Image (spheres, rainbow, N blue to C red):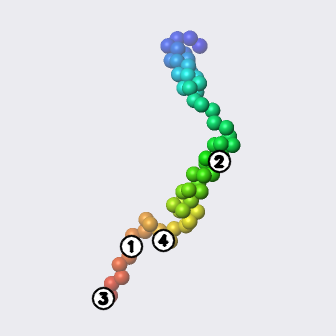
Amino acid sequence: MSGPSSVAAMKKVVQQIRLEAGLNPVKVSQAAADLKQFCLQNAQHDPLLTGVSSDPFRPQKVCSFL
């Protein structure tokens, strides 16, 4: 595996390693606590939890007498 394509691939690998080396690790327990807090704060706006009263994509019907 030699040539320009392998050099480009190795440059991508080195770039990814440098990116990952610059990240600060977060403990799993802290990440889970943050995720739980986010979910609880935004639960009232989540239609999967609160449900939807009617289909928002259905065209509204107008009642008219003939």
The earlier-in-sequence mark between 3 and 2 is 2
> Is 7 in front, or is 49?
49
Q: Residue 66 carries which label?
A: 3
Discs 3/4, front? 4
Which quadrant would the C terminus be assigned to in this image? bottom left
Distance from disc 3 to disc 1, alpha carbons, whole Å, reads: 19 Å
Return the x and y of residue 50 as percentages of the image width and height: 56, 66
Discs 2/4, front? 2
Q: What residue is pinned by disc 2?
A: 33
Return the x and y of residue 17 as percentages of the image width and height: 58, 23
Q: What residue is pinned by disc 4?
A: 54
Q: From this viewpoint, which residue is outermost toward the left?
A: 66
Q: What residue is pinned by disc 1?
A: 60
Which amino acid type is shown beneath numbered disc 2? Ala
Q: What element carries label 2?
A: helix
Which amino acid type is shown beneath numbered disc 1? Gln
Which amino acid type is shown beneath numbered disc 4? Ser
The residue that appears at 61% across and 48% down in the rendered structure is 35
